[in-house]
């Protein structure tokens, strides 16, 4: 009599627990359906909002050429871009310049642009630096540091890898070596 | 958002530092739990230490293999370490394989050890969410809810805070029932709880990778893990613990 009761209770318990699994599965599938992303491309790539974050559109910024002419990032839209915030006094910035120049030369034919945005230094100092390091990629001045602030470039150097559509694909804070830059550029150009 | 620690003169990123502190605390707590369960706590330190080294080395090798076309022409660069040149998914898989092999090789009581490690993992997870909040990672979809947080150009669901609260609750549960640990149930409860939390919270996440018709990968994986862990839990559940 007692054994029959125990077996019955165990069977009832098993049924209740398996019902729980079915309910969890059904609820989970329902939540997957409700919360699924309707415009996959928009959310996966971080929406059409400009923000200094991977997956978002690169925010627009203004800067000044070494000749004093005003320029904007949007002028270069359509190119894969490495937007590099730097300063002459920053050792890792100096360290990565030869690598940036080498990658620029290697991939310029593929449309790659490297845009150096110097942080709050005068044009004479930056021009001398450009000559000393034989840099051929375009360098601009961010005199008030507004472009750097827009990109929250708190640490120098900070590099933003931007694809042809204007989305930020990768952010690297700190000095980069050539393989790292090449790897990211290959990904930008779809060469992997 | 607090991407860098507010220490004058230093530019220290908050998230990696939080994760390092959390890793240390997790290993310390798991070691204490192991001691309490009758396993040498040093074994937990060994697993944690070697797993970290193996994860780093394999993550680095994984990155090199991924970008072999770049490194094949510049072999010296292989040993030139650089932040951002690690493929951490490969590292994590290698660390898990190492931990499993170490436990088998040392013939450690796997269920007790799983429960001890569960305590450490449960302590690590809330810190991980705080790290994401500090760095602005794992951000939510735009919302009009009054508790939304301003982040990346929009008012967003505070998914990092949701997951922090869920994982803090999970740690409280694991801590509360730790006297009953030792049979692998702690690890299973933690798996069920974390999978459920991710399944729910990731429903408000933006920037997610998707499969098929807009289904987030993390949610699909969480649901599969949840059902599997729940089945195991039920199979193993002692009669008195059903409620």
Image (tube, rainbow, N blue to C red):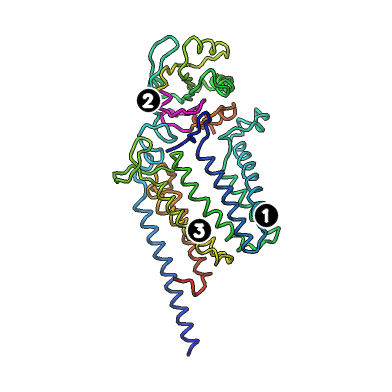
Residue B191 is tagged as 3
The residue beneath circle 1 is: B42
Q: Residues within 10 Å of mark 3 (few under 14, many from 20)?
A: many
Q: Earlier in the sequence, mark 1 or mark 3?
A: 1
User: What span is in magenta?
Assistant: A147-170
Task: Answer with left or right where residue A10 lies relative to residue A59.
Answer: right
Chain assignment, label 2: A
Q: Is residue B101 visible?
A: no
Relative to B214, residue B79 above or below: above
Relative to B45, residue A63 above or below: above
Chain assignment, label 3: B
- Check if mark 2 and mark 1 are on a common chain: no
Residue B105 place in picture, x, y as percent: 70, 58
Residue A61 is tagged as none
State the residue in front, A16 or B184: B184
Q: Mark 1 vs mark 3: give the one in front.
A: 1
Residue, far bottom:
A1
- State the CA–CA distance, disc 2 to disc 1: 54 Å
Q: Residue at x 58, y 38 (%)?
A: B86
Residue A185 place in picture, x, y as percent: 52, 28
């Amino acid at each position: 009599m007692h054994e029959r009761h125990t077996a019955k209770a165990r069977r009832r318990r098993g049924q209740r627990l398996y019902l729980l699994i079915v309910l969890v599965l059904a609820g989970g599938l329902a939540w997957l359906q409700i919360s699924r992303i309707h415009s996959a491309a928009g959310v996966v790539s971080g929406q059409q909002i400009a923000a200094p974050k991977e997956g978002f559109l690169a925010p627009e910024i203004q800067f000044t050429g070494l000749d004093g002419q005003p320029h904007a990032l949007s002028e270069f839209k359509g190119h894969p871009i490495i937007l590099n915030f730097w300063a002459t006094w920053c050792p890792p910035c100096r360290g990565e310049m030869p690598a940036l120049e080498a990658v620029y030369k290697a991939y310029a034919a593929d449309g790659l642009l490297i845009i150096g945005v110097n942080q709050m230094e005068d044009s004479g100092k930056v021009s001398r630096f450009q000559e000393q390091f034989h840099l051929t990629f375009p360098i601009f001045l961010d005199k008030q540091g507004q472009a750097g602030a827009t990109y929250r470039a708190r640490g120098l150097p900070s590099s933003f890898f931007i694809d042809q559509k204007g989305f930020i694909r990768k952010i690297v804070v700190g000095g980069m070596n050539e393989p790292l830059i090449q790897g990211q550029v290959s990904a930008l150009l779809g060469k992997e | 958002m607090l991407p860098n620690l507010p220490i004058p003169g230093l530019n220290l990123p908050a998230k990696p530092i939080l994760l390092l502190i959390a890793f240390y605390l997790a290993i310390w707590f798991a070691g204490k739990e192991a001691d309490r369960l009758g396993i040498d706590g040093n074994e937990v330190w060994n697993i944690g230490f070697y797993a970290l080294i193996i994860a780093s080395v394999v993550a680095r090798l994984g990155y090199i293999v991924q970008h072999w076309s770049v490194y094949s022409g510049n072999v010296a660069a292989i040993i030139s370490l650089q932040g951002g040149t690690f493929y951490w998914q490969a590292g994590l898989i290698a660390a898990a394989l190492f931990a499993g092999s170490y436990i088998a090789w040392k013939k450690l009581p796997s269920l007790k050890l799983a429960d001890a490690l569960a305590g450490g993992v449960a302590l690590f997870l809330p810190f991980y969410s705080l790290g994401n909040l500090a760095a602005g990672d794992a951000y939510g979809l735009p919302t009009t809810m009054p508790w939304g947080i301003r982040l990346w150009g929009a008012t967003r669901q505070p998914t990092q805070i949701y997951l922090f609260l869920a994982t803090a609750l999970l740690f409280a549960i694991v801590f509360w029932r730790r006297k009953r640990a030792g049979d692998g149930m702690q690890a299973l409860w933690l798996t069920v709880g974390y999978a459920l939390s991710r399944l729910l919270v990731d429903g408000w996440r933006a920037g997610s990778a998707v499969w098929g018709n807009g289904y987030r990968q993390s949610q699909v994986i969480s649901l599969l893990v949840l059902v599997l862990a729940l089945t195991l839990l039920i199979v193993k559940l002692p009669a008195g613990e059903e409620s």
